[in-house]
Image: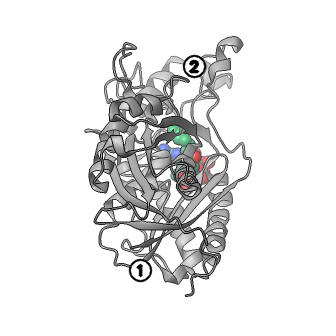
Amino acid sequence: MAQQAESTNPISAVISGVGLWTPENTLTNVELVDVLNRYADQHNEAHKAEIESGTVQPVAKSDPDFIEKASGIRQRYVYRKEGILEVDRMRPRIPKRRDDELSHQAEMGLNAARKALAAAGIEGSDLDAVIVSCSYTERAYPAIAIELQAQLGCDGFGFDMLVACSAATFAQHRAYDMIKAGTARRVLVVNPELTSPQVNYRDRDSHFIFGDVATAVVIERGDLAQSAHQYEILGTKAKTVFSNAIRSNFGYVSRTQDIDPFDPDALFHQEGRTVFKEVCPMAAAHIAGHLEQYSLTPTDVKRWWLHQANINMNQLITKKLLGHLASAEEAPIVLDRYANTASAGSIIAFSLHHEDLQSGDYGVICSFGAGYSIGSLVIRKR
Ligand code: CO8
């Protein structure tokens, strides 16, 4: 288990603090299925004749047992529950805020950021940069990251990035690069994943998949880090391969195309089976290749903090890597409680399951999803 290919750059980059903010509202599978099935009954009754003549498609009903078996998801948290379970609405009611009020995603991000800073034992003013990275931002500009930077009293710079499910890991890669290049000493990466506005709660294939959450990590120069739990980033690896199997088409050009913002095509949609089949082997090969760069094998890894989209996916990937079904201790699963929280899933798993590692233990953080995109970090506890 030699450590070949570790950088000769004397600057080390470490994850020194992580923060998780969980909304207070839960939404169970039964609640979601109940509203979808009531909607299906209403729609199918109202369009009975057209459905019989084949001019209108019936709305298919959902089933809580299917959801848990197919995905491992039992519940999810949502930022605002109001509106989602109203059969005539089925989307959250998130009030518009004035320009002089804190934006929703800045509020979510701030909650996680404060926890990450406390865990790292630093103040906002110690940061050089803030990156907000997630699947969607609620506006184009000013960047949510700059709003957060102001809230935290950081005298540096901030920017937003969107990379769907790999937003968190890809932003951590950028933070690592900045530390290594000497352009920043401490970077905060924040992931306010507000997914519920883009979920089609009328579509049985996807209504159960997502939840809202915010995560944050502090990545700092190794010689400055003071916290109790520090993880040196040995290296990062990113891969993207274009795919249309996961799409969300609503964007700023929609206005010019007279697109209905509630059209299913505008919301999140996917070919779940295709994603499953194509992404699992890609993710396993990616991780094995990344470990090889440090002459590590999967059995050298103490913990896998994997993307949380589907329990069967994670089991398949770890089985390909380890040759056996990973235990909950080896590869913690959080999606039973949190569902798929886009890029935050692997960071939730890291946040809840990292303190017991011993000095020298290796771990892998890895995301995989829309794009397709895969992002990994090989880390070692200091
Ligand atoms: N209830 C009952 N039956 C259902 C339901 C339901 N809710 N849903 C589907 N079925 C039916 C299907 O219609 C199908 O019926 P039939 O055989 O008659 O055609 C049958 O059940 C089997 O369906 P599937 O083959 O689709 O079922 P799977 O076993 O494949 O499970 C999953 C579906 C859970 C979606 C699975 O395919 C999966 O998890 N795939 C991986 C998907 C994935 O990881 N996607 C990543 C997306 S996340 C991402 O990239 C981030 C995007 C940014 C965030 C977006 C926020 C909104």
Q: Is residue 20 above or below residue 236?
A: above
Three-letter code, disc 1: Gly
Three-letter code, disc 2: Pro
Residue behind label 2 places its C-beta within 8 angstroms of ligand 1: no
Mark 1 surroundings within 10 Å by alpha-carbon count, few (fewer than 14), some (14 through 19), many (20 or more): few
Rendered residue at 53%/35% (across/down): 159
Rendered residue at 41%/78% (across/down): 361
Viewer-nearest of discs 1 and 2: 1
Residue 49 lies, in percent from the top left, at: 59, 19
Dot 1 or dot 2, earlier in sequence: 2
Residues at marks 1 and 2 touching, judged by CB atoms closer than 8 Å: no
In-image side of 369 versus 17 (left or right):
right
Secondary structure at numbered mark 2: loop
Residue 47 lies, in percent from the top left, at: 55, 19
Name the one closer to the observer, 370 or 178. 178
Residue 302 lies, in percent from the top left, at: 43, 77
Rendered residue at 51%/30% (across/down): 137
Q: Which residue reaches farthest right?
A: 242
In-image side of 6 versus 134 (left or right):
right
Picture quadrant of residue 291: bottom right
Residue wearing tag 1:
360
Camera sees residue 179: yes
In-image side of 321 versus 358 (left or right):
right
Disc ID at residue 261: 2
In-image side of 159 versus 31 (left or right):
right
Rendered residue at 68%/45% (across/down): 245
Residue 22 lies, in percent from the top left, at: 30, 44
Disc 1 to disc 2, C-alpha distance: 50 Å
Q: Is residue 217 above or below residue 131?
A: below
Mark 2 surroundings within 10 Å by alpha-carbon count, few (fewer than 14), some (14 through 19), many (20 or more): some
